[in-house]
């Protein structure tokens, strides 16, 4: 199948509500049609079908792939694209219309879930920027060498648990802040620290740590200075604070001043080696992944994906 180079391939990833999903797509469809955009839309049935549909759009020759979804859907599409040869990747441009539980990476560039008209106008201008991807390289339980790319961040430890709970509580409360606070309250009854051994540049960290965030992007507020186009990863290592300090840290996170907390130790690097993170869960772009076995490495690949941004 050959498609026009200007035709959009739209991958629509609805939220749980069927009624709300129909209204959401109808609004987007009207905006697209009013602008005379030529497109084909495919809709995912669940998170497992996103990768399959992304592969279909790529193999059918779409050069403009727009994801109506959140961080996890973007992650699936990017990982599908990274399976292709460089010459194919270089011809494809990725865009996003935020529609996820968490839209952290889209918000970094100024895309707002409540401003579809503005978002589509920006996408129509076709302003492309090459962006970086982070990559985790690890061994799974079967002893196989694996890797996975990320746009926003990887979390190791407590925050990976919180992110998982936050996705569930966001559907209940609606508010990002309320969902995070409720998730944190639940987490107070869970493990608060993990024995870790990390190599970051020339520094070795070998102690108990509450959470680590490795950000190619803002990292849900934990790596607020990270940008996905400087060839570097920002790392925030959080030692275990006292309860009062934990509440203070939550407030600083909500208000965008996370790095000001004295339990937070920031780094900037091209690579981090995790020699040990015993029992610590790993989250990648807001979704839990299977815990790696043994040592694993997280690095950055510079300017590797074409992404549509506001001009």
Image: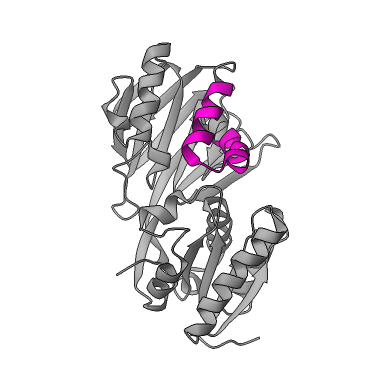
The answer to if 169 sits in the magenta stretch is yes
Q: Is residue 124 above or below residue 97?
A: below
Q: Is residue 178 visible?
A: yes
Q: Nearer the viewer, residue 146 or 307?
A: 307
**Which residues, given as a range, are shown in magenta?**
163-186
Total marks drawn?
0
Choose between 97 and 306: the one closer to the eye. 97
Give left or right: position of 43 versus 181.
right
The N terminus appears in which quarter of the rendering? bottom right
In the image, is residue 193 above or below residue 33?
above
**In the depicted view, which residue is nearer to us: 259 or 199?**
259
x, y percentage for residue 287?
Answer: 58, 42
Locate residue 91, reporting x and y percent.
46, 76
Q: Is residue 93 magenta?
A: no
Confirm whether residue 49 shows in the render: no
- Residue 295 placement, left or right of 141: left
* Quadrant in the rendering for residue 243: top left
Q: Name the residue located 43 percent from the left edge and 56 percent from the top edge.
A: 106
Relative to 231, 8 lies left or right: right
- Residue 303, position as x, y percentages in the image: 36, 60
Question: In terms of image quadrants, where is residue 235?
Answer: top left
Residue located at (29% from left, 38% from top): 268
- Quarter of the figure that contains the C terminus: bottom left
Colouring rule applied to residues: one colour
- Give the image location of residue 204, x and y in percent: 35, 22
Residue in the picture at 48% in, 51% down: 103
């Amino acid at each position: 199948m050959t498609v026009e180079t200007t035709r959009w391939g739209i991958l629509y990833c609805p939220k749980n509500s069927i009624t709300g999903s129909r209204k959401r797509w109808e609004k987007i469809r009207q905006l697209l049609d009013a602008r005379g955009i030529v497109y084909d839309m495919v809709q995912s049935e669940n998170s497992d079908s996103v990768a399959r549909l992304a592969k279909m759009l790529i193999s059918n020759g779409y050069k403009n792939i727009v994801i109506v979804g959140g961080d996890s859907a973007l992650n699936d599409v990017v990982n599908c694209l990274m399976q292709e040869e460089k010459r194919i990747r270089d011809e494809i441009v990725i865009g996003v219309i935020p529609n996820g539980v968490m839209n952290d990476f889209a918000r970094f560039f100024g895309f707002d879930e409540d401003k579809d008209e503005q978002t589509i106008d920006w996408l129509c201008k076709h302003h492309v920027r090459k962006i970086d991807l982070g990559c985790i390289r690890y061994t799974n339980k079967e002893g196989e060498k694996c890797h996975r790319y990320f746009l926003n961040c990887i979390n190791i430890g407590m925050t990976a648990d919180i992110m998982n709970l936050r996705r569930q509580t966001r559907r209940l409360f609606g508010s990002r802040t309320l969902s995070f606070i409720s998730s944190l309250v639940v987490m107070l009854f869970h493990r608060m620290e993990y024995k870790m051994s990390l190599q970051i540049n020339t520094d070795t960290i070998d102690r108990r740590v509450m959470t680590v965030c490795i950000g190619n992007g803002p990292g849900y507020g934990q790596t607020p200075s990270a940008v996905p186009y400087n060839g570097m990863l920002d790392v925030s290592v959080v030692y275990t604070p006292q309860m009062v300090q934990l509440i203070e840290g939550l407030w600083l996170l909500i208000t965008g001043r996370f790095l000001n907390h004295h339990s937070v130790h920031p780094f900037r690097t091209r690579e981090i080696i995790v020699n040990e993170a015993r029992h610590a869960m790993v989250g990648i772009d807001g979704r839990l992944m299977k815990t790696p076995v043994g040592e694993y490495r997280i690095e950055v690949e510079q300017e590797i994906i074409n992404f549509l941004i506001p001009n």
